[in-house]
């Protein structure tokens, strides 16, 4: 029983490390200047979700408990941070749950949309509806550039040892 708690604690620490890498990576100005991602709360949230998806998707095919525990811990870390961020933005205690439900629904929708898009080779449409969803006429060049970026990262993450990923030792391709 004690071993289970240690494994969960380790997964939580590793997920925090991975999330820190994601947050550091998405702060690169190139995403907002060269890829056309809206430099707004929603744009940054969607870009973060895209990177979380890339990690979770890489580990989905793994059958053992470690990747599943990591994925769950990563989800938990993301939404604990989102709760804190909403509070720092001035959302009151009564409003936070409503915003969190919307964000969790967005998370689930993005995960499903990106997974389906990878399988069906429809990433441009998924990006147009999600990452670039707040832009009425998203530039097709930005979308194609982002598709290439995603495809590179999917391949690069597949090359990493699963053990490195679940330990939070990840590296994304530069934008």
Image (cartoon, rainbow, N blue to C red):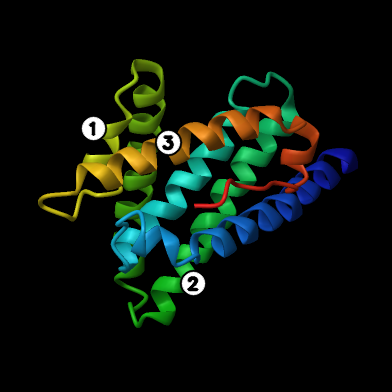
Q: Which residue is mark 2?
A: 84
* Residue shown at 69% from the left, 32% from the top: 67
Q: Closest to the observer: 14 or 165? A: 165
Q: How far, Cα to Cα, is label 2 from label 1?
A: 32 Å
Residue 87 position, x and y percent, is 42, 77
User: What residue occupies the far left of the structure in this picture?
Assistant: 136
* CB within 8 Å, label 1 to label 3: no
Residue 102, compared with residue 119, is above or below; it is below
Tell us which disc is closer to us: 1 or 3: 3
Left or right: where 6 falls relative to 55: right
Q: Secondary structure at mark 1?
A: helix
Q: Is residue 91 above or below residue 9?
A: below
Q: Which residue is mark 3?
A: 148
Return the residue nearer the eye: 175 or 106.
Answer: 175
Lower sequence index among marks 1 and 3: 1
x, y (%) of residue 106?
A: 32, 46
Determine the CA span between mark 3 and mark 2: 33 Å
Q: Residues within 10 Å of mark 1 (few under 14, many from 20)?
A: some
Marks 2, 1: nearer the viewer: 1
The image quarter containing residue 16 is: bottom right
Residue 6 seen in the current view? yes
Q: Quarter-wise, where is residue 166 in the image?
A: top right
- Mark 3 lies on a secondary structure that is helix
What residue is rendered at 23% in x and 32% in y? 125
Residue 139's place in the image compared with 21, above or below, is: above
**Figure quadrant of the N terminus:** top right
User: Mark 2 or mark 3, which is nearer the start of the sequence?
Assistant: 2
Which label belongs to residue 125?
1
């Amino acid at each position: 029983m004690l071993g289970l708690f240690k494994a969960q604690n380790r997964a939580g620490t590793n997920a925090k490390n991975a999330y820190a890498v994601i947050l550091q990576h998405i702060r690169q100005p190139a995403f907002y200047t060269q890829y056309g991602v809206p430099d707004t709360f929603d744009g940054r949230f969607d870009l973060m979700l895209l990177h979380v998806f890339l990690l979770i998707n890489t580990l989905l095919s793994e059958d053992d408990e470690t990747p599943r525990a990591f994925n769950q811990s990563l989800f938990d870390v993301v939404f604990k941070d989102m709760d804190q961020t909403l509070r720092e933005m001035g959302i009151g205690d009564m409003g936070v749950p409503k915003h969190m439900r919307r964000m969790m629904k967005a998370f689930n929708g993005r995960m499903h949309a990106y997974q389906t898009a990878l399988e069906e080779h429809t990433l441009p449409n998924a990006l147009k509806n999600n990452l670039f969803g707040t832009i009425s006429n998203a530039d097709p060049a930005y979308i194609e550039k982002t598709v290439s970026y995603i495809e590179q990262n999917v391949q690069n993450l597949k090359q990493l040892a699963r053990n490195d990923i679940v330990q939070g030792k990840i590296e994304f391709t530069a934008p």
